[in-house]
Image (cartoon, helix red, strand yellow):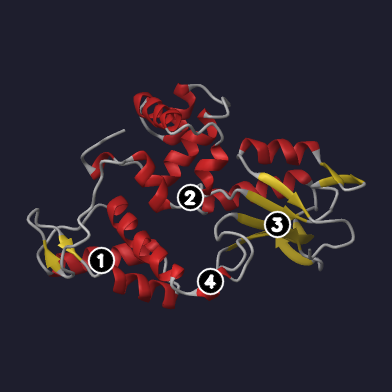
Amino acid sequence: MNENSDKRQLPCSTIRLICSLGLTHMASIRRIARKAEVATNTVRKVLSRAADLGVKDPAVINAMNAHVLLEKFYPDLKPSLNAKPNTINRNSRFNPDFKEIGKVMLEKHQELKDVFDEYVSTAASYGALPFSKVYFYKRLQREIDELITADDFYFAQDFKYGEEVEIDFSGDPFKVITHNGVMTCNCCVVVWPASYYMYAEFVTSQSTAESCRVFGNAIRHWKNRAPLFCVCDNTKAWVTSHVGKDVVLNPAFEKYMASLGICIDAAPPYHPQA
């Protein structure tokens, strides 16, 4: 996969989706292509590149940040990092101050889409063309990684950021007005620790089916960005029982998470906050 044009460069979410399905042999090439909305030949190239890298487990791909993932799959894509900020390059594209954009984005907790839209408007005001969205995200992610690395407090947690999510049900019920009248519901919440990213939905029961539905919607909401681990409590929807130190997971929940390439990390019994 040595495409010379960033127009042919796949988004990280698409690469992860293809690898999650292809490396686990869960679907045919044609089915993966339909799901990822790419050509079958593109699927073959992604899986071939993964094989060249010696990657057999999709969890390895899921654990890579965007910068590392794109460098692995597109080694020939060498962006010019020495260009002066707020200038127009020889291809009539506007080169912004990525470092300053990264600082503002972290301080104000801005969304990537909003940042890119603002960049496109700025490029137009200079009478220049913008970089592609994929290239812009890659350059910006490089600066953000360097900014985060420089601040020790970002690594106060004992896990890598973006590596795990936590899922739980709310303790208190809610009265929800529906087309069928007032129903008593709970809330199922999926959250990335040490971040502002959270997804929640009302559920009619604290069941495996309902929690899987919410989790799937959360992953789709985050544009197929799946974690490496899912930390859960000991409710019967997720954990059947504990035999000594061994956890017996709910088979349906375990199968669903395996389909996403996610490892379940159940809390120890009687220690739900562990």
Mark 2 vs 4: CB contact within 8 A? no
Q: Is residue 11 visible?
A: no
Question: Which numbered tag is attached to residue 72?
Answer: none
Place residue 169 in its image quadrant: bottom right
Q: Residue at x 22, y 55 (%)?
A: 131
Q: Is residue 134 visible?
A: yes
Query: Where residue 109 appears, x then y in whole percent?
Result: 45, 73
Q: Earlier in the sequence, mark 3 or mark 4?
A: 4
Q: Earlier in the sequence, mark 3 or mark 2?
A: 3
Q: CA distance from mark 3 to mark 4?
A: 22 Å
Mark 3 vs 4: CB contact within 8 A? no
Question: In this figure, which residue is indicated by the disc labeled 1?
Answer: 119
- Circle 2 Cα neighbour tier, 10 Å, few/some/many (<14 / 14–19 / ≥20): few
Question: In this figure, which residue is indicated by the disc labeled 2?
Answer: 223
Question: In this figure, which residue is indicated by the disc labeled 3?
Answer: 167
Query: Where residue 77 appears, x then y in whole percent?
Result: 26, 45
Place residue 137 in its image quadrant: bottom left
- Circle 1 Cα neighbour tier, 10 Å, few/some/many (<14 / 14–19 / ≥20): some
Q: Residue at x 36, y 28 (%)?
A: 45
Question: In this figure, which residue is indicated by the disc labeled 4?
Answer: 154
Which dot, 1 or 4, sits closer to the camera? 4
Q: Secondary structure at mark 4?
A: helix
Q: CA distance from mark 1 to mark 4?
A: 26 Å
Name the kind of residue labelled 2 in the image: Lys
Mark 1 vs 4: CB contact within 8 A? no
Q: CA distance from mark 2 to mark 4?
A: 24 Å
Q: Earlier in the sequence, mark 1 or mark 4?
A: 1
Name the kind of residue labelled 4 in the image: Tyr
Which dot, 3 or 4, sits closer to the camera? 4
Name the kind of residue labelled 1 in the image: Tyr
